[in-house]
Image: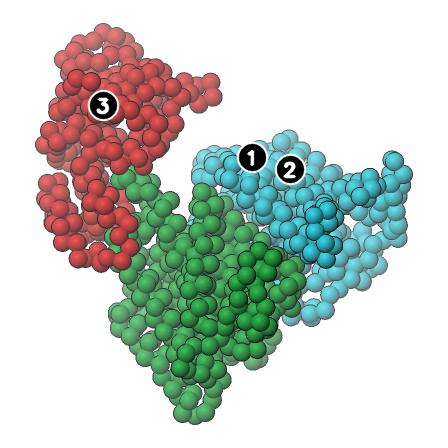
Amino acid sequence: MNNNILNIKNLSKSFGAFKVTDDIAIDLKFNEIHALIGPNGAGKSTLIKQIVGSVKHDIGSIILDQEDITDLTDIERAKIGISRTFQVSSVIPKFSALENIILSLLEKNQKTFQLFQNLQSNKDLFSKAERILIEIELDNQSSTLASELSHGDRRKLEVGLALAMNPKVFLFDEPMAGLDEAGTKMMINLFKKIKSQSPILLIEHDMDAVFALADRISVIVYGKIVATGTVEEIKSNALVHDVYLGYEV
Amino acid sequence: MSFILFIEQLLNGIQFGIMLFLMSAGLTLIFGVMGLINLAHGSFYMIGAFAAAIVAGLTGSFWLALIASLFAAAISGVLIEILIIRRLYRRDHLDQVLATFALILLLSEGVRWLFGAFPLYLNIPSSLDGSIVLPFNIIYSKYRMFIILTGIIIAIGLYLLISKTRLGIRIRAGQNDRQMISALGVDISKLYTIVFAIGAALAGFAGAMIGAIQSVEVGMGEPVLILAFVVIIIGGIGSIKGAFIGSILVGVTDTLGRIFLPNFLKFFMDPANATSMGSSIGSMLIYILMASILLIKPSGLFGKNEK
Amino acid sequence: MITEKFFNKWIFLLLLIIPILGLIFNEPYYITLTTKVIILGIAGVGLNLALGYGGLISFGHAAFFGIGGYVTAIMSYHAINEELLFDWLIAIPGSSEMLIIWPLVLLISAFFSFLIGLLSLRTSGVYFIMITLAFAQMLYYFSISWPTYGGEDGLSIFMRSSLPLVNTMNPLIFFFICLFWFAISIYVTSKLINSPYGMALQATKQNEERVKSVGIETFKVKLIAFVFSGAITGLAGSLYTDLNRFVSPSVLDWHMSGEIMIFVILGGIARLYGPLIGAAFFIILEQTLGAYTENWQFWLGLILILEILYARSGIMGLFEKKNKYE
């Protein structure tokens, strides 16, 4: 409804008696970067996993672009427009950067089950992949094996994989983790560039990056969203100060 | 189909299951703690039986033979673990499968080389020969009863070992988180060797016990190994409880199935066809059971998710 | 370093030379031996598709080898004895025409690999290995206890299946028939691997989670590889029955599954001609060591263990640098 591309309501998940996500309501608007912050163990990763579909929620609903995807499998959600990066970089190690991107293009271009056609003859796939590499500034590494890329480049490649899917939303799980200052700056610029293509829901610990990037921030503590607002609002929120212990705003 | 026959076959099924348990417990422990799939486990069954047959031949004592089987299997387990198995822990499953398959070839042909292709014999001691009378006037083989009771005692012993001893705690911790226990200062390689040796000893003991009612020959462990795999798939890899329940289930299903299925089919078709179809389906029964269970629970009845 | 393509061309040439030499020196034994290597190589090429390229560790490929073998023998048996198959259900005449048997073998093997794959691919890791093993064992025990087709003693067929215009009993002619199928199996594998689907398959082997996250149905990807794999190995089984004019439950035994895996590993996983090299090496060992001692498999086991521990890329890996798909 209205301006939201992603709408999540009442999302709850318990492992035994432990409630990891507790009645979470969160949304993502067009053209925005919505950051999710919170102490370790607050439930951020589990929340992403439930949105992506790799963990089955107990109750709640997830609506993507007016469509209820609550009962879809993880693969179906990916096909319908949910893209993601992983907390620990996950790429195809023995494929080159270019080949990784091509893999990500297969489904949208309906090539996945082309059994007897030569891959090399798909010039359009190759040029699309090249363009994406240029967009993420990885074109000089196009034939480097993914396992041989630097940490930062691998993170970039993951963003490229998400881009290639032409998705409706980007879900990034700690994309800045392990990056140096230059790498972080590069990611920030990249995200600002791509947010107009699709909005980003971002888990991050690097507060400087969050404040530089986010249009909105949600704070999650013990599985519950305790505050949502703009950077200024969150910075001056007393409750956030109180519950997010040990953290200097 | 008389009641007595049914009970007798049920007991046979339980006896079969108990022996399977000794095999599968080791297999599932080794997988649970070390993450290693060991195809050569059947070779320890064989080694135990051979050791028993040889010692019985030399000394005339069945009991010494049993003890010999434990030692022989445990010692070979330690040797093989140190020489080969420990290099496989970090490898992927494919390497483990192939290396342990190669190990079967090595051990089987090695034993054949040493002892020739003819089977050896192990005799039931006179104290256990003959039959005993059970409630309801059921007459059953004394030796098979001995197997059942011994198996149960070992199962209880294993349970106590795992749940009440320090070693058991380390084993359980190792099943849960391998990296953690080494960080906590437990000597991992010694633990692994011990677990491997326990598994081998259990298998060897089972081989010796069964060796007295079947013949002792090269390759005797292989059919049992396959069944042990079926057991731990059904029971869930890494779960001793699953191995126990799975073994009894497999033992009873297989035994009763083979006996009663042909008779059951005789109601529907002529005796000749019933017998052949019955025994064919009977031999496939446990695989059908396994497939059905996997359809509902892909990691077995009590399986944990594989790391 | 010698490139793989160069190596492959030379292997093919060698394959042609040996039997011709055998013809010249009037030693049909070597022609038959090379034929056996080729047939086992085809079985390995089948497995390599699922295992080498797809990462599916199937320890039950003997099931398909045996299905192909038994379908061929059963059809032949019924043709020769002029009996009908399934008399009580539907009447199918037997046949000993290769042109009829081959499509049937491919279809039936594909069907069984579809079924087994459908059930087994729901599991992964060690469970997958063991469930494929168990399914093959199921067929093995069935073949032993089903008396009609020989049970434990196996089934002989008096004549090799026939092909129009040629005499299939001629060793050289049969060799070329098998070579033809080897070329087909390599061609099909190569086409699949180098297609967009092949990319999805090989990616799935390396990082299934990632592949799923870009929207690819990895179950379907794996199943397709498994079906092609089973069909190719099944065809090898059919040729094997024709080679020996005999089939027995031992082709369904897990040792057979292990041997096919050995061909693939020895030769080098995910190398197109690898299984052929592996099969050749295996047969050479069998012939040379086997002449000295009955217990030659002891040495095979030892060599294998050493190879797995110290020379992981197989024989082809000794010549060529690691290929990127290993």
Label 1 close to label 2 by CB (< 8 Å): yes
Residue at 46% of width from left, 68% of height from top? Answer: C101
Q: Is mark 3 on a helix, strand or loop?
A: loop
Residue at 40% of width from left, 58% of height from top? Answer: C229
Query: To which residue does mark 1 refer?
Result: B302
Q: Residues within 10 Å of mark 2 (few under 14, many from 20)?
A: many
Query: To which residue does mark 3 refer?
Result: A66
Disc 2 residue type (three-letter): Ile
| Chain coloured green in this rendering | C
| Chain coloured red in this rendering | A
Q: Residues within 10 Å of mark 1 (few under 14, many from 20)?
A: many
In the picture provided, is B251 more to the left or to the right than C162?
right
In the picture provided, is C98 more to the left or to the right than B42?
left
Of C85 and C113, which appears nearest the observer?
C85
Q: Quadrant of residue A46?
A: top left
Disc ID at residue B245: 2
Name the tint of chain B in the rendering. Answer: cyan
Q: In this rendering, do the residues under marks 1 and 2 share a single chain?
A: yes
Of A139 and A104, which appears nearest the observer?
A104
In percent of width and height, residue C325 lies at 31, 57
Instruction: Tell me which chain the residue with mark 2 is part of.
Output: B
Of B122 and B172, which appears nearest the observer?
B122
What's the CA distance linking mark 3 and mark 1? 41 Å
Instruction: Tell me which chain the residue with mark 3 is part of.
Output: A
Residue A104 seen: no
In the picture provided, is A117 more to the left or to the right than B54?
left
| Quadrant of the rendering where the N terminus of chain A is positioned | top left
In percent of width and height, residue B7 lies at 80, 40
